Amino acid sequence: MDSKTVGILGGGQLGRMMVEAAHRLNIKTIVLDADNSPAKQINALDEHVSGKFTDPEKIAELASRSDVMTIEIEHVNAQVLEELENSGSNKASVQPKPKTIALIKDKYLQKQHYISHGLATSHAKDVASTPEALKQIGYEYGYPYMLKSRTDAYDGRGNFVVESEGHIEEALKFLNDRPLYAEKWARFERELAVMVVRSLDGSVHSYPTVETVHKDNICHIVYAPARVADSVRRQAKILAENAVKTFEGAGIFGVEMFQMPSGDLLLNEIAPRPHNSGHYTQDACVTSQFEAHIRAVCGLPLPDGFSNFSTPGTNSIMLNILGGAEPNSELETCRRALETPGAIVHLYGKSTREKRKMGHINIVSGSMVECEKKLAFIMGTGPKPQE
Ligand code: ATP
Ligand code: MG
Ligand code: MG
C-alpha cells in the first residue's frame, strides 16, 4: 500500500491497536517504549526502540528511522519533538504537531486555550499547592470542587474530589508535589464524547456522538450512539469539531464533554490520539479510530462515510475490562463475552493488576435494548440472551 514507516511514541494498548490497523495497510510501525510493551508484542517486523518516550536520545533514534512520528499518549517530550521538527535534519514529520501535544499535555494550558477560543468549558483556576490557596478556592467555588494535576494525568490518577475544607490536607498529600489547578464541580447530567479526525489539510470529520459512563474516574461503559436527542448529538459534534479545528496537525482526537442540566455542553478535555470512548468504532463503524488515525497522519484518503456506523441502525456498547481484585478474575467476564453473539473481545497482553485496563469488549447489535441485555449477561448480572 504505502512504503511509509510510522514511529509511535508509546507502546500501550492504543499503540497496539494502531499497529494492528497500520499492518493491514502494509504500513510499517516502530514503537518507542519498554521491551515487550503491548504494541511491540504484535509487531515483529522491525527492531523497536527500547526506552522512555520522554528520552531525547531515544526520540531522535525513532525519528531517524521514521517517515511520520505519532503518539499514543500525550505525556511524551513535546519539546524534543518540536526541536527535531525545526532542526531540518530530521525527515520525519510529527502528527499531530508538537505544539498541540505541548498544549494538551498540560491540562490547565489546555483549559486556557479553550477559554481564549471562546469554547465552552468548566470553570478552572491555577492554584498553588498550599492549604491556604485551596481554602481560597473553596470560598470561590464552594464544595465539592475538583483538584487536578496539570500534567501526567490519566484515568483520574491526577484528580482529587475536595469534598470539604477538611479534605484539603488529604488532597495535597494525594497529589503530592504535582503542579495543580482547580475546577468548579460540574453537576453534569451525563458525559458525551466525540472522536474527530483532522486531516493534513486541516479538514475535520467526526464519528457519532457517544455517551460515556465513568466509575472512580475511569471510563467504564460507552454507549454508541449516545442515548440523547438528535439535536444534542449534533450540538456535541459541532462543539467537538470546532474545538479540534483550533489545534494543529493531523490525527484523531477524543473530545470529552459534560452535558449540563440546562442542556449546555462544556468541554472537559481532549486527547490528541485514539481514545477509550472510540474503541466501539473497531467493530461498529466502517473505519476504526485506529485506522482513521493512521490514514490521517500518513495523508491517506478518508472517503465520505468512513466514520459512519457500518450499517444504519447499528448500536454498540463498549465495556472496559479492568483487572479484578483476584489476579486474572477479569477473564471470567471475557469468557462470558466469547459465549455472546455480537460481542467482540479485545485484550491488550498486559499482566493483570487491580483496576488496570486489561482489555475491552465491544457489543454490536441492531438495538440498544439488545446490547444492554448482552451487557448484563457479560457482566454477570443477567441471563444468557437468546438470539
Ligand atoms: P482520562 O483517562 O480521560 O484522560 P483524566 O485523568 O484526564 O482522565 P478527567 O477527564 O479530567 O481525568 O476526569 C475524569 C472524570 O472525572 C471525568 O470523566 C468526570 O467523570 C469526572 N470529572 C472531571 N472533571 C470534573 C468536574 N469539574 N466536575 C465533576 N466531575 C468531573
Ligand atoms: Mg485526560
Ligand atoms: Mg478524561
Image: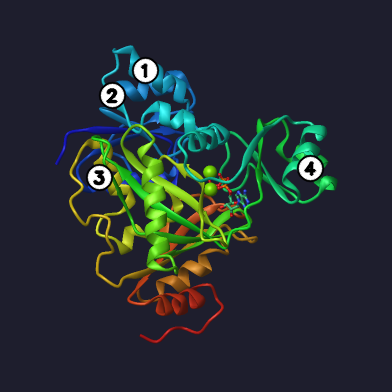
Sequence order check: which comes first, mark 2 or mark 1? 1
Q: Position of residue 36 (x, y in %)?
A: 44, 40
Task: Please state if 327 lies on the left or on the right of 206 as rendered.
Answer: right
State if disc 3 and disc 2 touch (CB < 8 Å).
no
Task: Please state if 309 lies on the left or on the right of 303 as rendered.
Answer: right
State if disc 3 and disc 1 touch (CB < 8 Å).
no
Asked if the residue at label 1 sits under 8 Å from ligand 2, the reply is no
**Residue pictured at 35% horizontal, 48% vertical:** 196
Tag shown at residue 84? 1
Give the Cα distance between marks 4 and 1. Answer: 45 Å
State if disc 1 and disc 2 touch (CB < 8 Å).
yes
Q: Amino acid at mark 4?
A: Tyr
Dot 1 falls on a residue whose secondary structure is helix
Q: Amino acid at mark 1?
A: Leu
Give the Cα distance between marks 2 and 3. Answer: 19 Å
Q: Is residue 246 above or below residue 264?
A: above
Assign the C terminus to one quadrant of the image.
bottom left
Give the Cα distance between marks 1 and 3. Answer: 26 Å
Q: Which residue is mark 4?
A: 139
Crowdedness of circle 4 by 10 Å Cα count: few (<14), some, many (20+)? few
Q: Position of residue 144 (x, y in %)?
A: 73, 51
State if disc 1 and disc 4 touch (CB < 8 Å).
no
Q: Which residue is mark 2?
A: 92
Q: Amino acid at mark 2?
A: Ala
Crowdedness of circle 3 by 10 Å Cα count: few (<14), some, many (20+)? some
Q: Position of residue 346 (x, y in %)?
A: 40, 59
Q: Position of residue 58 (x, y in %)?
A: 42, 22
Q: Which residue is mark 3?
A: 23
Sequence order check: which comes first, mark 2 or mark 4? 2
Give the Cα distance between marks 2 and 1. Answer: 9 Å
